Amino acid sequence: MTLTTRSIGTTGLTVPTLGFGGAPLGGLFDAVDDLEAAKTLSQAMDSGLVYVDTAPFYGFGRSERRVGDILRGRDYVLSTKVGRLLAPGAAPDPAAMGWPAPLPFHPVFDYSYDGVMRSFEDSLQRLGLDRIDILYVHDIGTETHGAENGRHFSALAQSGYRALDELRSSGRVKAIGLGVNEAQVCKDALGIGDWDLFLLAGRYTLLEQDPLLDLLPACQAQGVSIVVGGPFNSGILVGGDTWNYGTAPDHVRSKVAQLAAVCRDFNIALPAAALQFPLGHNSVVSVTPGLRSRQELSDALQWSAQIIPEEFWTALKTKDLLHPDAPTPDMAPFIK
């Protein structure tokens, strides 16, 4: 199978429509064996998933170290993130932050000019690479910071963005954006800078399409591309019981059950529909599920190859399970 590719605006970057999310390689919720992590990412690269996303926060450096070791010497497109610096010393309760077996560091928020520059340099060192293609501002927004978000967003607007723009202007990175789980902060960010793309996790999926009404048109107007992370809404669309990194509420479970019923009628795997749906929108350049094992990679490749007829999407809209104006993908959005 040869993956299709899409271009990120005028950056010169082209990414495969199926990317590799590196949070699980940092041990998100469960530790991942070093050998399995290496084999999974190596096999993914060999299969065409040459766009890889990671972050300092993922395992407090563990994901970046693992990613760098596999990407070194290969052709790749790599994104990592700024906004958290890693300080020596274990966090008091890293498992509560989702990392049961991280490296012995703890994250410190810093969205300032100096914080962005230091984060970029630190990531190069952890990765052991001389090139990062995309820098995202990580987890800015009220869901992460609550009442403190105003202070952090001001730091980004007043100085952190200038660092990102300088790194892009100098050619040290090719693209800049946000990597977040909420749409509102992306809308806010459109007013403070010239962005290339947003990595939006869990908010434009088979389960929820609210950004279709405001964020996606605004991004189209400003030429901002979208990478969709969390296409399975943190597990509920792939047979799990979690949504938005917590226990799925009843209304979410009910909708998933209805989606699954339509999938059965058409003999389509629910995860295949979830993986393929976002690519119907022409602002979306890549879908990047988090993958922690070769089995999960194999599943994702199988789901991306499944042919889904237009009649399936029509049925979802008829049953009010999909926004009536949501653009839907062709029958093989991942395959050339």
Image: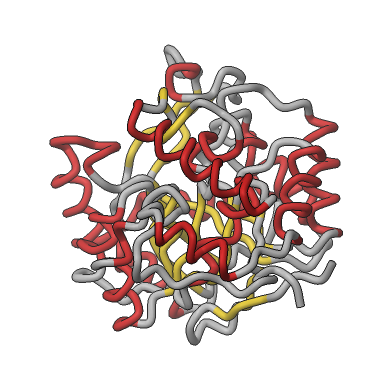
Count of numbered tags: 0
Q: Position of residue 146 (x, y in %)?
A: 19, 35
**Residue 324, image x and y in percent?**
35, 66
Residue farthest toward the bottom in the current orientation of the protein: 10
- The answer to whether one can see residue 167 in this image is no
Q: Is residue 24 above or below residue 30?
A: below
Q: Is residue 278 above or below residue 182?
A: below
Tell me the quarter of the image containing the N terminus.
bottom right
Q: Which residue is rendered at x = 63% and y = 45% of the image?
A: 264
- The residue sitting at the top extreme is 92
Q: Nearer the viewer, residue 101 or 299?
A: 299
- Quarter residue 6 falls in: bottom right
In-front residue for pair 328/134: 328
Q: Determine if residue 293 is in view.
A: yes
Q: Nearer the viewer, residue 72 or 100?
A: 100
Residue 232 left/right relative to 44: left
Going 40% across and 33% down the picture, which residue do you hit? 254
Q: Residue at x 26, y 38 (%)?
A: 143
- Asked where in the image residue 126 lies, by quadrant, the reply is top right
Residue 45 point in image, percent of width and height: 80, 57
Q: Which sits in the foreground, 176 or 158?
A: 176
Residue 154 vs 254, above or below: the answer is: below
Quadrant housing the C terminus: bottom right
